[in-house]
Image (spheres, rainbow, N blue to C red):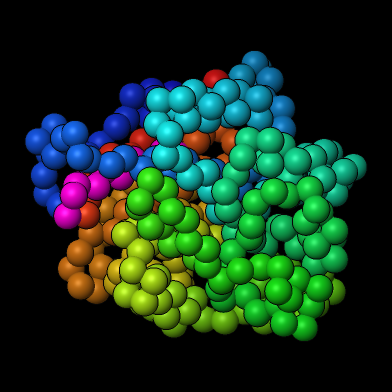
Amino acid sequence: MKRRDFIHKTAISSAFLGLGGLSLSSFKSASTKQLTILHTNDVHSYIDPFPPNHPKNPNMGGVARRAAIIEAIRKESPNVLLLDAGDIFQGTPYFNYYGGELEFKLMSMMRYDLATIGNHDFDNGIEGFYKQFPNATFDFVSANYDFKNTVLDGHVLPYKIFDKNGIKVGVFGLGVALEGLVDKKNSKETVYNDPLGITQDMARILKHEKKCDLVICLSHLGYKYKDEPNKICDVKLAELTKDIDLIIGGHTHTFLDKPTVIKNSDNKEVLVNQVGCYGVNLGRVDFYFDTDNTKIADGKSIIVV
C-alpha cells in the first residue's frame, strides 16, 4: 500500500471488531460502560515532530501533539488507560544526551499508566534503565523476563490490575528474546523465559483467579515474521492461547490501520494491534461492556499531526 493511501485510510479508519457479534448501535444503552485503551510502541526517543520535508513522515508525530490528542480523548471518555509496548529508548540525540530521563518525564506528564520493556530499553545497560526509574510515575510489567539477580529485581511487575469504573482490567507484559539483540553486558543476568507458557499462566491467573473483565497483553514480541513462521509473535500467541482479549504489540514497527481479529485456541476472538513507530500514530481501542459484561470493541489508529 502506498504511504499516502495508507495515511488516508488510517485517518478515517474505525471498525467494529467482533467480541460478541452485536452492532455497536444496538449494544449501547444507558447501562453500557466504556473503556478506552490508548497505546504507543517503539517511540524510540522521538520527541519532536518530523520536519515538513521528511520523505516518509512529513510533519507527523511529536510528544506535544500526542499529549494534546490524549487530553482531548480523556475529556470525552473518562475511563482511559494509556499503555506503551516498549522500545521507549534509542533513536535520537535526546536519548544519547539525557539517557532516557526526558522520555520518562514526558510520559509521566502524559500520565501513562503502564509500559513493558523492549530490547532497546537495555541500550544504556540494565543499570541505566534502573537509574531512570525515579522519573517514571508509571509502572513496568514483564512476565517472561526474570530479573531476580539484577538491580531490577522487585521493580518490574509480571502484571498489574486496574479498576476503571467497575471494569477490572488485568495487563501483563512480554519481552522478545534478548540473544542476538541485546549485549550480555547490558542485560547482565536477565533470564528470558518462553512467552507461550508464561502467557497461559498469566491469562489464567488474570481471567479466572483475579476475575478480570478484560485481559490485555502488552507485548514486545513482534506482530508476525514472514521468513520465520514458527517464531513466536503476537499473531501466533493469540492463536495458541486463550483468555486474552487484546494484544498490544511492538518491536516489528508494524503499521495497522485497525486491530487484527484472531481466533484463539477456544475459537474466541482476540484483537491484536500495533501502531508502527516513532510516535507517528496513537492506537485507540474502545471496549463497551453491558450489564452482564458482554463486550464489543471499536478500534482505529490516530495519526499524530
State the image coordinates of residue 232 (x, y, percent, origin top left): 45, 72
State the image coordinates of residue 256 (x, y, percent, origin top left): 40, 42
Q: Can you say whether 304 is above or below 202 in the image?
A: above
* Residue in the foreground of this view, choosing between 113 and 8: 113
Q: Can you say whether 47 is above or below 238 in the image?
A: above
Quadrant showing the C terminus: top right
Look at 60% across and 28% down and name the residue there.
Answer: 67
Name the image quarter holding residue 217: bottom left
Look at 43% across and 53% down and name the residue there.
Answer: 163
Look at 11% across and 49% down and name the residue there.
Answer: 21
Residue 188 horizontal side relative to residue 61, left or right? right
Look at 22% across and 50% down and name the residue there.
Answer: 295
Q: Which residues are magenta?
A: 283-292
Q: Main secondary structure of the magenta part?
A: strand
Name the image quarter holding residue 169: bottom left
Q: Can you say whether 214 is above or below 75 in the image?
A: below
